[in-house]
Image (cartoon, grey):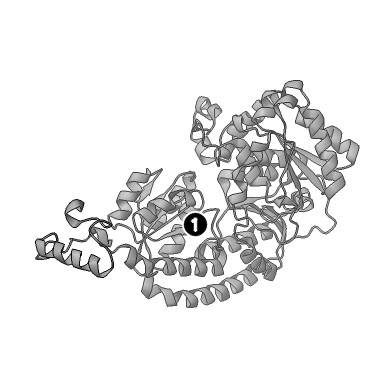
Amino acid sequence: MNSLSAKIQDVFDEPACDKNRGKDDKARKQGCARALTPGAAAGGCAFDGAKIVLQPITDVAHLVHAPLACEGNSWDNRGAASSGPSLWRTSFTTDLTELEVVMGQGERKLFKAIREIKEAYAPPAVFVYSTCVTALIGDDIEAVCKRAAEKFDLAVVPINAPGLAGSKNLGNKLAAEALLDHVIGTVEPDDAGPHDINILGEFNLSGEFWLIKPLLDRLGIRIRACIPGDARYLDIASAHRARAAMVVCSTALINLARKMDERWGIPFFEGSFYGISDTSEALRKIAELLVRKGADPEILDRTETLIAEQEAIAWKKLEAYRARLQGKRVLLNTGGVKSWSVVHALVEIGIEIVGTSVKKSTVEDKERIKLVLKDDKHTFEQMPARNLYAMLSGGKADIMLSGGRTQFVALKAKTPWLDINQERQHPYSGYDGMVELVRQIDLAIHNPIWAQVRERAPWDCSPHVKDELPGTSNDTENLHAVGKSAGKTPSNWVDVEEMR
């Protein structure tokens, strides 16, 4: 635990983090972790954050050293996609029982599990995750992993990020530290070139990275490693030979980008592939960094040619939606890079932003939002569900873009909703992704179901009162007559007077 505490303090003192630089020494040591909500395990603990960052490495066996329940974390509801290996979709756990915890058999069982995975699947590496239980009982996963690596001639990587260490964001950074300590730099590639780059913080949700890679391929730019989206272990192990890097989500992996720059001289910038202008700007900056590192300057001209071509195609496709969406109001309840990149993308086609969350956004993110929206009146750190509902039911927005946790607020307010977070079903990055995002917004807003659900229910309408109420003597006589014609007598059916 001492090594973990030292690692946490090192992560908290992150000089590349804008929020961290603005703190005094005392506040910096406390880090960014907020008190966890009891019972809110999904998406909330360090173990979960580490799993989110590392699970998309597709050819690795991810072994959770814990009781069975810890394997039920939230990584599986994220739409990361693989173009090849499927081993990452297999759950591996040591499944510790109470007896094994009490008798101290955890390390022995972990070693045996690594051997079984080696024999059955022969992966290039096994990632072993510490959890609250195994951290509390003192299992030394680093020692076990080192011994297993020597015994089985296999890369066995300890991920020391138990849930009790802190928040999900801390887990992201601890996962990056594990890659730096045990993976990156362990393999020397034999094909390093002047146009190799790393993409950090890209998770390939719904295959989004596959919309970007063809653009880079056309420029002759090779992805040495995309961490972690659709990644392979050997690609990450040789990532230290890239010439430049782009950080997509700085709140998750800024420490990885900075330390790779310090150790191997890989310059980086933070950018976004959401929106036409931001995608173009990201391609320009990648080309500029490569030229700074020795690439042929002619790549700059080829980049501008590609940008002009792709922008013209995208804007032509978007013209079909401009008239239908002009002036439509959007509420964004998201955070991080999407808080400004999606804002910029929507404003480009005439959509009005009535509010955007800046939760998990950096200082630079917030400044970008101010530049796009001209002020910060439409930003909020976190909006309670009741306030979201009041805003939507009051007709202040035509659609809400958010994650699945708040979708039912929008549906209760009878307002269109579109998933923009990790559970989304459509890719929204790059030029084609921007067109797809606008298409989905158009489909959601103009779906005819909203006109139907907003109509008053039949039971909410004013009742129609007849001129003559039932129950008169004539009604009774008629009922008796109907009963006799049906072969019934007053002895075997209920008289209307009795029903009263």
Relative image position of residue 135 (x, y in whole percent): 68, 27
Q: Residues within 10 Å of mark 1 (few under 14, many from 20)?
A: many
- SS for dot 1: loop
Decide if residue 57 is in sight here.
no
Q: Residue at x 21, y 61 (%)?
A: 461
Decide if residue 493 is in sight here.
yes
| Image position of 245 with respect to 160: above or below | below
Which quadrant of the rendered structure holds the N terminus?
Answer: top right
- The amino acid on which the numbered mark 1 sits, given as a three-letter code, is Ile
Q: Residue at x 76, y 23 (%)?
A: 104
Question: Is 360 situated left or right of 325 in this image?
Answer: right
| Image position of 15 with respect to 207: above or below | above
Q: Quadrant of residue 62?
A: top right
> Which residue, given by chain and number where applicable, does mark 1 sit on?
420
Q: Residue at x 50, y 70 (%)?
A: 435
| Image position of 255 with respect to 431: above or below | above
Relative image position of residue 390 (x, y in whole percent): 30, 49
Closest to the observer, 376 or 261 = 376
Question: Is 43 situated left or right of 113 in this image?
Answer: left
Closest to the observer, 384 or 193 = 384
| Image position of 358 with respect to 84: above or below | above
Q: Quadrant of residue 328?
A: bottom left
Question: Is 157 situated left or right of 385 in this image?
Answer: right
Question: Is 62 situated left or right of 337 in this image?
Answer: right
Q: Quadrant of residue 93?
A: top right
